[in-house]
Amino acid sequence: MSKPRRPTLPKQSTRRPPPAPDAALPARRLERVFGKPAPEWTAADLVEFVRTEGVRVVSLMHVGSDGWLKTLDFVPRSVEHLRDVIQGGERADGSSIFTGSGIRAGASDVLLRPRVSSAFLDPFAARPTLVVMCGHAGRDGQPLPVSPDTIVRAAHARVQQELGIDLWALGEVEYFLGKRAAEVDSYGADERGYHASSPFVFGERLRRQALTLLAEIGVPIKYGHSEVGYIRPAANEDTIWEQHEIEMSLAPLPEAADHVVLVHWVLRNLAHQDGMRCSFDPIMRKGHAGSGLHFHFSPTKKGQHLGRFDKDGRMADPGQWLIAGFVRHGGALMAFGNRVEGSFVRLLQGKEAPTAVAWGRYDRHALVRIPITARAADGREVSPPTIEFRLPDGSAHPHLLLAGAAQAMVAGRAVPDLAGLLAATAAERVKQDPSGAPRLPVTPREIAAALAASREAFAAGGVFPPELLDYTATGLR
C-alpha cells in the first residue's frame, strides 16, 4: 500500500506585505497602500486602487499662470476610460488658464498631462476622490512653453545639464489665521507668539491637522510652529489675527514649487471648515509683522549638499554661484516673488525683512542668509546646510520664482569678478557703508526695470518665454 502524498505547500514570499493604510509610517498614505515609494507607482496601480477602493471621482489638478491650483474632475466610466485619462491626459482651454501668454482663443487647446507619482486622496472631498497633479502639453504633444510647470522643470534641467549639479529647495510658508474675538483668545500678544503653545494660540489644532494631512498627501514637512505676528481686533473689525508657519523639507525645484501651492490649498480648506479666515498677504496691518515666503536652497551632487563653508571658511563654488545670482538678479525676482502692494509695505517696515542687497551668516536683514546647521553631539550634520533667500512673500508665484532662482544661479557662475562681487555685498561690509550697496526696488516700475536688466539671464536656454517676460513687465509698468 503506497503512502499518501504529502500536500505541496506554496513557497513563502520573502517580500514583506505593505503596511496597513492606517499605519503611521511611511507618512504618505498611498505609499502605505501600494507598499512602494511614489517614483515606482504605475498607471496600473492607480487604476486598481480606484477600482477596488470605491473611488468615484478623479481630479486632475494643475497650476495656472496666476499661481493658483486649477481642477478638472471626472467620474471614470470604465477601467479603459480611467487608464486612458491617466496615461494620455485631457484637453483644456489654454487661453483661460494662461492669460496674457499669447495663446489665442482660436487655437487654445492644451493637454493636461498627469504625473502618476503625484497622486493622493483628496482629504476634503465629500466622496472618495483621487487627485493627480498635472503638467501641460501643447498641440504638438511637447511640454507647453508658457506653463509654470514646464518653466520650472526646464530651469531645473538646465542647472543639472550646465552646472552638473542638482538644485533642491524648500519653502517657509507664513500665514495668518483670523477668527472672531472671544474671551478665550485674550492670551495672545504681539511679538510674543513665536513657538507659543495652546492656549496662548488658538490655531495650534488647525496647524497640527494641516501637518498631518500634508504628510498624508505627499508633502514632506520639516516642522510647523506659531509665529510672532498677533493683531488685536480693530474698531471696525472684530477679528483676531494670529501668525503661524509651516516649513517643508528639501525637494527638487519642481516638487518644491508644487508643495507650496498644496500647503496653501490645505490651509485655506481647513480654515474654511473651521469658520476662520486664512491669509498669506505680505502685510495684514501696518506696523505689525508681515508674512514672508522664504526659500532655502541646497545645491547637491551625488547626494552631497554643497551649500556650506569648508574648514577654511570658504563657500563651495555652487553656493557662491547661487549667492551671486541672488545678489545680481534679486530685484528682478521680485516680479515673481513680491507681486502686490503690501509687498513693499513689508519690506519698508524692515521687520526681519531684507533692507539691503547683502548676504551673510545668520543675518535676518540680509537678502541672502546662511543659517546655522543642526549637528549631533559627534559633529554629524542632522539637517542639510541651506542658503536662504529672504525676499519673497506670500504673494509669490512659486513655480516662476524657483525657475528664476535657477536661472540666476546659472548666470551667477558667469559673473566676471565673482570674488569681488561677494566681497562687496557681504553683510559686514554693507553695514559699515550702506551707501555703497545696491538697493532693492521699492515700486512696481523699478521691478520692471530690474526685470528688463535681467531679461537675458531669465530667457537663457529657452526657459522663460519672451512673451511671458513682456507680459509681466507690462503689468508692472
Image (cartoon, rainbow, N blue to C red):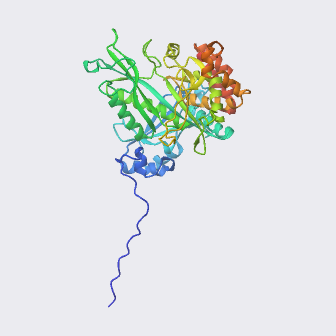
Q: Nearer the viewer, residue 97 or 345?
A: 345
Q: Residue furthest right?
A: 416
The vertical placement of 58 against 201, above or below, is below
The quarter of the rendered structure image containing the N terminus is bottom left
Q: Residue furthest bottom?
A: 1
Instruction: Please report the residue visible at 46 percent of the width from the left and 39 percent of the height from the top.
Output: 220
List x then y, in percent, for residue 227.
41, 24
List x then y, in percent, for residue 57.
40, 41
Q: Nearer the viewer, residue 473 or 238?
A: 238
Residue 464 in view (yes/no): no
The vertical placement of 330 against 60, above or below, is above
Residue 337 in view (yes/no): yes
- Apparent side of residue 97 relative to residue 3 in the rendered image (left or right): right
Residue 336, quarter of picture: top right
Residue 320, quarter of picture: top right
- Apparent side of residue 257 relative to residue 142 in the rendered image (left or right): left
List x then y, in percent, for residue 237.
34, 12
Q: How many marks?
A: 0
